[in-house]
Image (spheres, grey):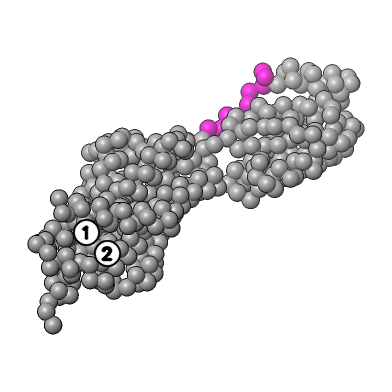
Amino acid sequence: MKALAIAGTELRILLRDRSSLFFLFLLPMGLILVLGATFGGSAEPRLGVVDQGRGALSGALLRELEAIDDVRVERLGGAAELRTAVERGRFQAGVIVPAGYDASLRGGGRTAVELLARPDQDGMRLGPTVRAAVARQGERLRAARFAQGERNVPLPQALAETDRVAPHVPGVEVRTVAAGEDPFPATMGRFTEGAAGQLLLFVFLTSLTGTVVLIQGRRTGVLRRMLATPTPVRTILFGEALGRFGIALLQGVFIMAGSALLFGVDWGAPLPAVLVVLMFCLVGSGAAMVAGAVLRTEQQAGAIGVLLGLGLAALGGSMMPLEFFSPAMTVVAHLTPHAWGNEALAELTRHGAGLADVLPELAVLGGYALVLFAAGTYLLRRSLTRDSAPG
């Protein structure tokens, strides 16, 4: 019971701090939202269109754009409105069909369709899509002009005959397939990658920076006074370890549940997903025990905790997927527990893996947790007994 009381005190102290609440709950969810909205590619990109030509050909071009799969097209009234909407992120790209579009094309002239695109993944992806639609209309016009010259008929009639014949002309079919296993399947949600990486990053980072409470207890003599009571050292150590684990688990469960409810993140099979998070929470709390025993001041805990937390997360694939690492960097990344955690979560969230598929990663994470807890318990016991020694 004393161990539970110690752990509960640790949690209460942390939760009373408003800055801790921000880093525990608000910041992780905010980053998941920002990363998913910026780099996620599963949601439908929005394309705004303005038809200044208001003719049959410009209308046909807009219908061509509206028929594109997985693109949400919305018509606007003016070019200025569209530019503002693209600048503010309401649309990832915009198309402006100029006035005189039909007259220029029917007269055999050239005209330019204006494309506005944001400098992000969806904006860059919409550029080739719009150009392909414009090119298809150009091919239709060239075919109609050929028919017009051969049969000496008006252009509208030639266009109608081209549209009638086109479905019966064999086309070139292009299929895109993934060679081997697709590391980022199309079914993966746009927030999934960011949620998995941020969960591991913040659980480890909060565990390290949360050692401030433990260091305060050592520095102010609270732990030393506890030893003066009928409380064994092992009870104090277990209570401190339980407190570190409770903080890590609280944040891990919140990120997992919050991202599922707010952003629709699918964490895969529940049992192995929970086991991966539990094991990584043990790793984080074990590292916190080591840091709490070695570091002497709260300032050291804040600075070194942030440096190690962010550095290991970046090296372990929490900021950029491991698939983008070079072979040499992949080997180096697997010196961190983050890489094993990210691999396990990737198997679960992207490929529907089961418990047997992530057992190797769970075993490695368990090894990290065992070593860190053994080292942290030994160092903290030595520190407490040294500080409490007479003289």
Report the quarter where the C terminus lies: bottom left
| SS type, badge 2 | helix
The answer to whether residue 108 is visible is: no
The residue closer to the viewer here, 287 or 327, is: 287
Q: How many marks?
A: 2
Q: Is residue 271 left or right of residue 229?
A: right
Left or right, residue 159 beside residue 120: right
Identify the residue shown where x is 60% and y is 49%. Answer: 120
Q: Which residue is mark 1?
A: 240
| Residue 160 location, quadrant | top right
* Residue 29: image location, x then y, percent: 45, 47
Numbered disc 1: secondary structure: helix
In reply to whether residue 169 is colored magenta, the answer given is yes
Q: Which residue is mark 2?
A: 214
State the extent of the magenta-drawn residues as a range. Answer: 167-175
Q: Quadrant of residue 113?
A: top right
Marks 1,2: beta carbons within 8 A = yes
182 displayed left or right of 240: right
* Quadrant position of residue 266: top left
